């Protein structure tokens, strides 16, 4: 059998990032119009309610994804090691359990909404019932993305996110033309986006995973083995994150007001979208495939850290120039978000540099450290959010976010320097560009541009 790891990391990385960049440009174009319709259709209060409902849904959805990080990591490693039977068993075990609980959550929320929210009006309860339909399409969509990532099918993976936004925009435009875009219509567009994207993924997934038709299941439970050992730390980590990471909007609602949830939410959304532009979409999939190759992972860690810093700084500078006019022109009701945005964006390079280190730690199965690190971070964040928001309002939330970003960077850096996971060393090469680095970057840029041109020709046929 051909060695699944016999591939060029650089070529896969560049090729994957080209596909993600190409589709992200198109997706961002659609996302802008989706956001335009949502933000212009909802008042500030309505958008705040939308964020609060999404935070509650996100907590429940997070429960259905617990352990997903370690499962995805091991699926990629099993495929890379040629153990298709183990990958097949783990995939069906894990996502089968997710589907069971997804149907259970749907039934509880849809049929029990009136009992769960007795003090809320019928309009709110009906909106909650609609979002209950999102559980199953999201589980199916995420499991299909798992299969594509496992096969390094970055072209298919990147294009499906565009499809989700395309369907969502089409549905919102329809509701907008008949003059009715509210929370219910927004949730319907999200449901149909995931559903149709999943349907169009089926044929490609069957083709990419045809090897499973001739492979049986491994004899023992892979999920049980993982979650009884190192995987249990990932479950506890996600459990704490699921609860604690969704509290922030409610803290703002309690200590400031409902509208403030939307003001900070827009600032945070803009920073998140800008962070998503930095081309590291494929690292989480590629690094586990080389986790056992010390020299190779060291090179990726060194060069990735330097590139993350340079790209994040460039992205920040461009964002300071172009984002303010965009907000003032299209979303003037959210001008109050801009000062918060400026301060949050300034620390984006710090969090970006941590991305490569985090992917390496996950790939090397250091789940115990990740559990204590993530849990401690979330607990401290909630305490800081509460105290500082109570004391300083929304600016307290900004101070809290910046403090947590810096503390996380120093904690993860200290761990890598002291523990050297997987033999990774932090040396001068981690921060200083060498002549060899410049040559690699020059080649990568040229290759990136060639692949971008080729990709554009493929999709637009010119």
Image: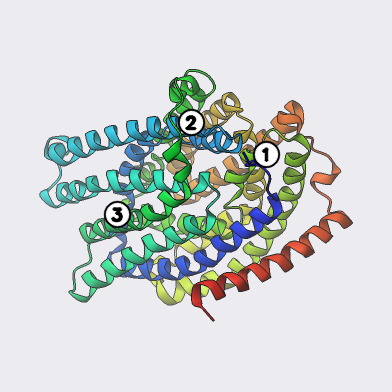
Q: Which residue is mark 3?
A: 195
Q: Is residue 192 left or right of residue 302?
A: left
Q: Which residue is mark 1?
A: 290
- What residue is at 43 percent from the left and 58 percent from the top? 161
Q: Is residue 135 left or right of residue 382?
A: left
Q: Are marks 1 and 3 in contact (CB under 8 Å)?
A: no
- What residue is at 51 percent from the left and 78 percent from the top? 461
Name the colour scheme: rainbow
Q: Secondary structure at mark 2?
A: helix
Q: Say which of 199 and 329 sits in front.
A: 199
**Mark closer to the chain start, 1 or 3:** 3
Q: Position of residue 428 (x, y in %)?
A: 85, 43
Cα separation between marks 2 and 3: 28 Å
Cα separation between marks 1 and 3: 34 Å
The outermost residue toward the bottom is 462
Q: Position of residue 21 (x, y in %)?
A: 56, 64
**Mark closer to the chain start, 2 or 1:** 2
- Image quadrant containing the C terminus: bottom right
Q: Residues within 10 Å of mark 3 (few under 14, many from 20)?
A: some
Q: Which mark is residue 372?
A: none
- Image quadrant containing the N terminus: top right
Indicate which label's residue lies in the foreground, 2 or 1.
Answer: 2
Q: Secondary structure at mark 1?
A: helix
Q: Which residue is mark 2?
A: 85
- What residue is at 22 percent from the left and 61 percent from the top? 185
Q: Position of residue 232 (x, y in %)?
A: 48, 22
Q: Are marks 2 and 1 in contact (CB under 8 Å)?
A: no
Residue 386 visible from this viewpoint: no
């Amino acid at each position: 059998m051909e060695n699944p790891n016999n591939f060029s990391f650089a070529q896969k990385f560049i090729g994957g990032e080209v596909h993600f960049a190409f589709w992200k440009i198109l997706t961002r174009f659609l996302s802008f119009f989706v956001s335009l319709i949502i933000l212009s259709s909802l008042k500030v209060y309505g958008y705040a309610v939308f964020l609060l409902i999404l935070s509650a849904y996100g907590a429940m959805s997070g429960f259905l994804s617990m352990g997903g990080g370690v499962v995805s990591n091991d699926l990629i490693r099993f495929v890379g090691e040629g153990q298709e039977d183990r990958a097949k068993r783990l995939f069906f075990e894990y996502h089968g359990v997710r589907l069971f609980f997804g149907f259970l959550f749907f039934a509880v929320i849809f049929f029990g909404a009136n009992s769960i929210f007795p003090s809320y009006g019928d309009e709110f309860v009906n909106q909650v019932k609609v979002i209950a339909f999102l559980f199953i399409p999201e589980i199916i969509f995420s499991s299909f993305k798992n299969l594509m990532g496992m096969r390094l099918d970055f072209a298919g993976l990147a294009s499906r996110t565009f499809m989700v936004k395309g369907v969502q925009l089409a549905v919102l435009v329809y509701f907008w033309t008949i003059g009715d875009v509210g929370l219910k219509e927004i949730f319907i567009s999200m449901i149909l986006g995931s559903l149709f994207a999943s349907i169009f993924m089926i044929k490609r997934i069957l083709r990419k995973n045809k090897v499973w038709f001739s492979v049986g299941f491994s004899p023992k439970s892979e999920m049980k083995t993982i979650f009884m050992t190192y995987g249990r730390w990932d479950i506890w980590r996600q459990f704490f994150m699921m609860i604690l990471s969704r509290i922030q909007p409610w803290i703002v609602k309690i200590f400031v007001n409902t509208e403030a949830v939307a003001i900070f939410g827009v600032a945070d959304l803009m920073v998140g979208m800008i962070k998503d532009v930095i081309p590291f979409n494929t690292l989480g999939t590629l690094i586990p495939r080389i986790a056992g190759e010390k020299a190779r992972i060291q090179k990726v860690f060194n060069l990735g850290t330097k590139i993350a810093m340079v790209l994040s700084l460039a992205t920040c500078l461009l964002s300071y120039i172009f984002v303010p006019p965009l907000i003032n022109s299209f979303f003037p009701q959210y001008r109050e978000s801009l000062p918060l945005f400026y301060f949050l964006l300034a620390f984006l390079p710090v969090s970006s540099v941590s991305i490569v280190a985090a992917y390496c730690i996950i790939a090397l199965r250091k789940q115990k450290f990740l559990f204590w690190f993530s849990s401690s971070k979330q607990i401290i964040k909630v305490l800081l959010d509460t105290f500082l928001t109570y004391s300083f309002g929304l600016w307290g939330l900004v101070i809290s976010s910046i403090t947590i970003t810096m503390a996380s960077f120093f904690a993860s850096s200290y761990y890598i320097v002291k523990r050297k996971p997987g033999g990774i060393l932090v040396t001068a090469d981690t921060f200083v560009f060498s002549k060899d680095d410049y040559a690699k970057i020059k080649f990568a840029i040229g290759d990136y541009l060639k692949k971008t041109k080729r990709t554009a020709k493929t999709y637009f046929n010119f």
